[in-house]
Image (spheres, grey):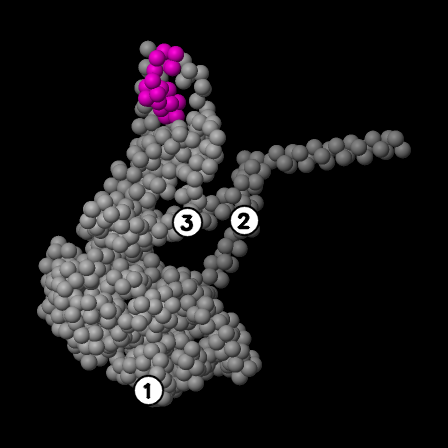
Amino acid sequence: MHPSRGVVRRTVRPAVPLLALALALSACGSDGGGGGGSSADGRIEGRITFQTWNLRAGYKDYFESLVKEFEEKYPDVTVKWQDQPAEHYADKLGADAAAGTLPDVVNVSPDLSYPLAKAGVLLNLDKEPVAAKFKGEYTAEAWRGNTLPGLDGAYAFPWYLTTGPLFYNKALFRDAGLDPEKPPRTYDELFGAAAELSRRSGGRTATLAGTPAIEDFGRYGVRLMDEDATRFTYNEPRGVELLTRYKRLHDEGGLDPQALTSTPEQAGRKFLEQKVAMNPGGANDLANFRKNAPSLYRNLGITDAPNNTGKPNMYVMGLAVNRNGKHKAAAIAFAHFVTDRKNQEAFAHRVAVFPSTKGSLDDPYWTKHDGTDEGRVRVASAKSLKGAVNYTPVVMSDEMKTILRNEVAKALQGKKSPKEALDDAVAQSDRLLRRK
Amino acid sequence: MARGDMARNDTARRDTARRGVRLHHPATPWLLLLPGLGVLAAFSLFPFLTTVHDAFTDARTLVPGQWVGLRNFRDMLHDEQFWVALRNSALYVVLVVPFTVLLPLLLALLVHKRLPGMGFFRSAFYTPVVASVVAVALIWSWMLDDRGLVNGILKALGAGPVSFLGDSWLLLISAMALTVWKGLGYYMVIYLAALANVPRELHEAAAVDGAGPLRRFASVTVPAVRSTMVLVGALSSVSAFKVFSEVFLLAGPTGGPAGEDTTLVMLVQRTGTGLDGRVGYASALSLVIFVIALLLMLLVLRAGRGGDAAERREERR
């Protein structure tokens, strides 16, 4: 016998039972999607992990005191708070979910919770009585915002909502001969003002720094998907009409030359540099304008984003519970604690966001001006949130958003007609949707 | 007593010999290699094999996937973005590699001379290599902006503004320029090492024979650093084919206007990441990139060997 063969055999033999044990253990770890972990209505105890999305930098103290307060209320629970940066958050969630290490309570938006829920790693709150009993504490729109098509239920406790006004530069409006006190409120007025701005400035002043995204189609009144969210429909005549108007705007110089590639951050910078006349934003931007662009701040106008439906757009944040967590009762209790009325309102007083709990927006903080610009934006945004909807379909993946964006760019460049571009975007997205 | 000592010494020698024999056991080299091989297997071989396997499945980020045979590769043939990405990656090789082979050589020839202050220039040329590509790309994007430094200069010269970041071709060329600029110092250092081995006598002999600087460069320097040029060509062609950061940072996540500047690695990133990533399709793309990059490298190395053989034949004659 060759000595090395003997060595190999001596090495491998003891490893066989170890491998078998490892395989058996790994099989134990996977329950085939049936949902593992402890009972949701068990004792509130154990060590749970709570993950937020890019909130440590500004709100460390708030979350630490929140965790402390919860641990005092439930002494048998220990909460480990962790925060992930904004970049690649979805990739991090995907890696954790695939490895079975998803945190017990995790900060998600509906488009992130959809694939996670579909993979069976999130708790259906409507189907879990311990969680469902809190449903009445949140606004119907916010709870509905976390309800996922085809999955029969809400998969996250509604947390904070964001919406934003449209900022405009009064000086640029004045230079173009437009009344700075009468900003455009409908799409007709927006396109009219843009043409005027471009014409009077000799093409030097663009109105917008970005191309239309899916929520713009929604606000314009385009039907985005069919009822059961199995097919995109934004290529309907109204969608083609919107893109045709954007194409005209682009040709007239109403869109910034780099609009086809710009990110929201770049668009914000263009507005800050006073290269474009209008840009969507939020109350958080005011401090930035005041500090970095005082001349813009002096001429800052604030209005609602143009809307043909009467329903503004809102973005919904939620806290989902890991379906396979070891301490589900504690996770549900904590997710509810963070999102209850008291804590949501406290958080919204620190950040320019809005609570999703019933009755919160009737508080004078969100209904009465305090004389500041922040207060004005806050009150106007809170008012617009009543009846607001999340236009972005939750089944629309990042890849589908990129497809729409690239096809819109082709139409704006004149490489395709608006109809061809939207038909192609819908066909490609539907193909991806069918393979999900 | 003395006999006892001798016996003990004999035993000690036998033990030492036995230990020596053990150290020379056939399995010993493998045991020594085991930690390195373990790391290689865990972080290179296993992911590679997984990628090859996934390329034939419809796996998604959260779904293991089913065997679909060659479907991903068939889909690729009908994917408009794949052909755009392949074109851009190929163009990157064709247009970037000649510059990354020749410019660093010229730069190395400049700083090779032992003159006062040359150390400063060597360091200055190498600085872009150590700078973060993100920071560098950000600075370039500011410079190339419609109202940036470059357009400011053009305006001062009476030329109209050029939309470097708004036009897909100009954007791709700008990214190529950034790649070349950032790689100059790295390849320059490789050439400096090669130039240090070129005997000074060869240049002196050529000069005595009446060869001018250009002739000496073509007939002495280039043949002397030929194998280094092949190495730089192979390295830079593979890295140009796999370009990601420069284009991604200048063109944005959509890959430039209408995605016209997407490269193959960007397409892998776009399709394979996120919670809904098409891991199977992205793996198939990765496999195609691997095969093309491998062929590219073999081609460059073969071309280099072909040149060497021709040279040897010439010498024999």
Q: Which residue is mark 2?
A: A13
Q: Could you tell me which chain the residue with mark 3 belongs to?
A: B
Q: Residue at x 50, y 43 (%)?
A: B37
Q: Amino acid at mark 1?
A: Thr
Front residue of A172/B276: it is A172
Residue holding disc 1: A367
Per the image, label 1 sits on a secondary structure element best described as: helix
Q: Are marks 2 and 3 in contact (CB under 8 Å)?
A: no
Q: Residue A336: tell me if it is visible.
A: no
Judged by depth in the image, the label closer to the viewer, 1 or 2, is 1
* Res. B132 mark: 3
Q: Looking at the image, is A239 positioned above or below residue B143?
A: below
As drawn, A86 above or below B226: below
Spatial separation of the CA atoms under disc 3 and disc 1: 48 Å
Chain under disc 2: A
Q: What is the spatial separation of the Cα atoms under label 2 and label 3, in whole angstroms?
A: 49 Å
How far apart marks 1 and 2 lie (CA) works out to: 74 Å
Q: Report the front residue among B243 and A14.
A: B243
Residues rendered magenta in the picture: B206-226
Residue at screen point 41% across, 49% down:
B132
Same subunit, labels 3 and 1: the answer reads no
Q: Chain of mark 1?
A: A
Would you say residue B32 is visible in this rendering?
Answer: yes
Q: Position of residue A25 (x, y in %)?
A: 49, 62
What's the residue type where badge 3 is placed? Answer: Ser
Amino acid tagged 2: Arg
In the figure, is residue A53 to the left or right of A241? Answer: right
Kindly report which numbered mark, 3 or 1, lies closer to the viewer in this rendering.
1
Q: Main secondary structure of the magenta part?
A: helix
